Image (spheres, rainbow, N blue to C red):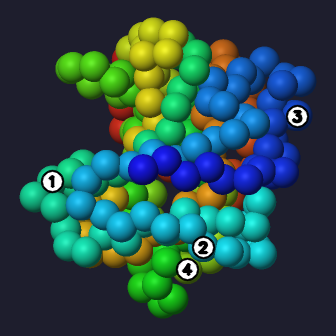
């Protein structure tokens, strides 16, 4: 199921990223969440979220693997080995007072599903722009990548807003508005 998220948005960092060496590799104008697995997907009006809408992912039970159910987003440009990859997305736990988590990955859509960046992001019930960042240990070809948020690690509700994925050379900071940043566990070795 694909749900478009209206944006006026998340893209506070978009203009700044365009002006720096940071390159947006996701669709900044229309980030669309797709999904797969045993989940219920719906829209939720939320005035605090950019664009006023969130996508609610309800996971009725933990999967055998945390990757059994996911939200997915398109990546339209290549990632080169050695690029700094930043995954940014608005998210929160959809259940007040109850934490949730996602495993955020940018990687290849074909086997062996190599990851350019991956990290576990803990969510509370406040909407924030979460980031996962690291140096890509692999090349991912043009239109051969995807953003995936694995959600099947627990029975939980996750609310998602707009996302953005960028790459840049070393020596500069991301221009995305990261409230929290997780270091990628997929790291290039020097």
What is the number of the mark on residue 65? 1
Q: Nearer the N terminus, badge 3 or badge 2?
A: 3
Q: Mark 3 points at which residue?
A: 15
Q: Nearer the N terminus, badge 3 or badge 1?
A: 3
Specify whether 125 is left or right of 136.
right
Tell me, yes or no, if residue 146 can be seen here.
Answer: yes
Q: Name the residue under label 2.
A: 44
Vertical position of residue 91 compared to residue 2: above or below: below
The residues tagged by marks 1 and 4 sit, at their Cα atoms, a distance apart of: 24 Å
**Could you tell me if the residues under marks 3 and 4 are in contact, i.e. CB atoms within 8 Å?**
no
Tell me, yes or no, if residue 187 can be seen here.
Answer: no
Q: Nearer the N terminus, badge 3 or badge 4?
A: 3
The residues tagged by marks 3 and 2 sit, at their Cα atoms, a distance apart of: 27 Å
Q: Where is residue 156 in the image (x, y as percent from the top left)?
A: 34, 75
**Toward the viewer: 126 or 49?**
49
Q: Quadrant of residue 20?
A: top right
Q: Closer to the camera: disc 2 or disc 4? A: 2
Q: Mark 4 points at which residue?
A: 125
Q: Nearer the N terminus, badge 2 or badge 4?
A: 2
Task: Using a 10 Å C-alpha cutoff, classify the residue at mark 4 as few (fewer than 14 neighbours), some (14 to 19) or many (20 or more).
Answer: some
């Amino acid at each position: 199921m694909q749900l478009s998220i209206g944006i006026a948005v998340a893209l506070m960092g978009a203009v700044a990223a365009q002006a720096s060496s940071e390159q947006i590799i996701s669709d900044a104008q229309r980030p669309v969440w797709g999904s797969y697995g045993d989940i219920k997907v719906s829209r939720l009006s939320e005035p605090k979220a950019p664009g006023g809408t969130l996508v609610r992912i309800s996971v009725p039970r933990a999967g055998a693997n945390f990757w059994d159910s996911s939200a997915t987003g398109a990546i339209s440009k290549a990632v080169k080995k050695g690029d700094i990859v930043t995954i940014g997305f608005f998210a929160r736990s959809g259940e007040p007072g109850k934490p949730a988590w996602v495993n955020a990955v940018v990687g290849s859509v074909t086997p062996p599903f190599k990851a350019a960046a991956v990290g576990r992001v803990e969510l509370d019930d406040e909407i924030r722009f979460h980031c996962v960042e690291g140096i890509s240990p692999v090349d991912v070809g043009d239109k051969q990548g995807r953003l995936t948020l694995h959600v099947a690690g627990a029975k939980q509700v996750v609310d998602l807003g707009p996302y953005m994925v960028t790459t840049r050379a070393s020596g500069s900071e991301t221009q995305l508005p990261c409230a929290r940043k997780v270091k990628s566990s997929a790291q290039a070795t020097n």
